[in-house]
Amino acid sequence: MNERIVIVDDDAIILRGADSTLSGDYKVTCLKSGRMFLDYVKKNPVDMLLLDIRMPEMDGFETLKALRDWERESGHKKTPVIFLTANDDGESETRGLSMGAMDFIRKPFASDVLKLRIGNLLELIRLQNDLHHEVEIKTAQVESLSVHLVQTLAEALDAKDNYTNGHSTRVAMYSKEIAGRYGYSAKRQEEIYMMGLLHDVGKIGIPDEIINKPGRLTDEEYAVIKEHPKKGAKILSAVTEMPGLVTGARWHHERYDGKGYPDGLAGDDIPEEARIIAVADAYDAMTSNRSYREIIPRDRVISEINKGMGTQFDERFARIMLRMIDEDKDYTMRQHLSGD
């Protein structure tokens, strides 16, 4: 594969010997100091670093620490490191291995031994990378299957309600959009999307005649509807691979002022994702047809969200929702985001 190997040593004889031994099989770069290497690695790919321990100005341990600090800050993957040492020093070896070095090679080294050690270690790295790649593929396949299953379940749930078809998907999309604008990472945006898809899963246990009743519900029927967050949380608690799903299902009807249900949580005691979903859910409820009314006009939706800031909604997420509505001059966001 012509891996790129960098050798750092202040001894010119060691550099020439290592270069002569390895350059026929690998792309070899020789540098005389740790500082030169730290400048080099920021601009060039490195598959393996052979690093001398005893060097003036910056020794091998200091160089490795600086390298790991840069890799952590920049998000760069860890460079495989092998220490070169003329000392038979167990303490140095323990220190180097604890810092993440792969191995130690004694100086002066025999050419054949150096080639075998480097070849074996690079083969190990290739096998580890292949395994990691296979795990990533399988993980992606499982995640894709999970998303498909969740989407299918959400669609089956929405099909129970003649008036809100697509509700779960829209709430998921609005929630993801709010989360993204608030600064959530891509991974957290996907997580809240999944929560949004299944926030109403507890309605599976609600009789169809209540869900699809034309006109307003009686107090007794409304009490049954209010059980769906608990039912949803109970259903999703069994999905141990995605524990966050419970958050959206149980607490999306909590209110910022503590007057919501099922637990009467208030303010920051309500999980942040649930506060986001609450705004998205309310918006979709107002902008969808219901058995007892048609879509609410845009100006009134804005007024209702403004009125709910600090009482029904967390003001931060309500303001993001209002910005989204303000950008939606034609009042067609539900089609643009959900693909209706």
Image (tube, grey):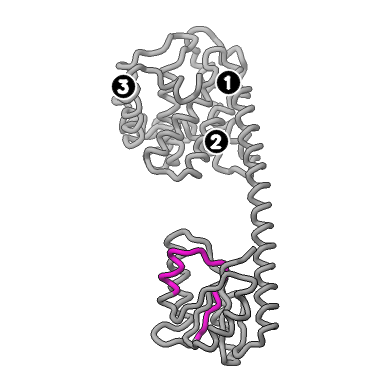
Query: Is 174 or 305 nearer to us in this picture?
Result: 174
Q: Amino acid at mark 2?
A: Met
The x and y percentages for residue 340 are: 50, 18
**How packed is label 3: few (under 14 Cα within 10 Å), some, or many (20 or more)?**
some
Q: First in sequence, mark 3 or 1: give its number.
A: 1
- Looking at the image, how many numbered discs can be counted on the residues? 3
Q: Amino acid at mark 3?
A: Ile
Q: First in sequence, mark 3 or 2: give its number.
A: 2
Vertical relation: 89 (above or below) 281: below
Q: Secondary structure at mark 2?
A: helix
Residue that mark 2 sits on: 194
Vertical relation: 203 (above or below) 37: above
Start and end of the magenta stretch? 37-53
Residue that mark 1 sits on: 158
User: In the image, what residue occupies the spot 32% across and 25% down?
Assistant: 327
Q: Is residue 327 magenta?
A: no
Q: Is residue 51 magenta?
A: yes
Q: Amino acid at mark 1?
A: Asp
Query: Is 139 or 88 nearer to us in this picture?
Result: 88
- Residue 255 lies in quadrant: top left
User: In the image, what residue occupies the spot 61% across and 35% down?
Assistant: 147
The x and y percentages for residue 265 are: 43, 38
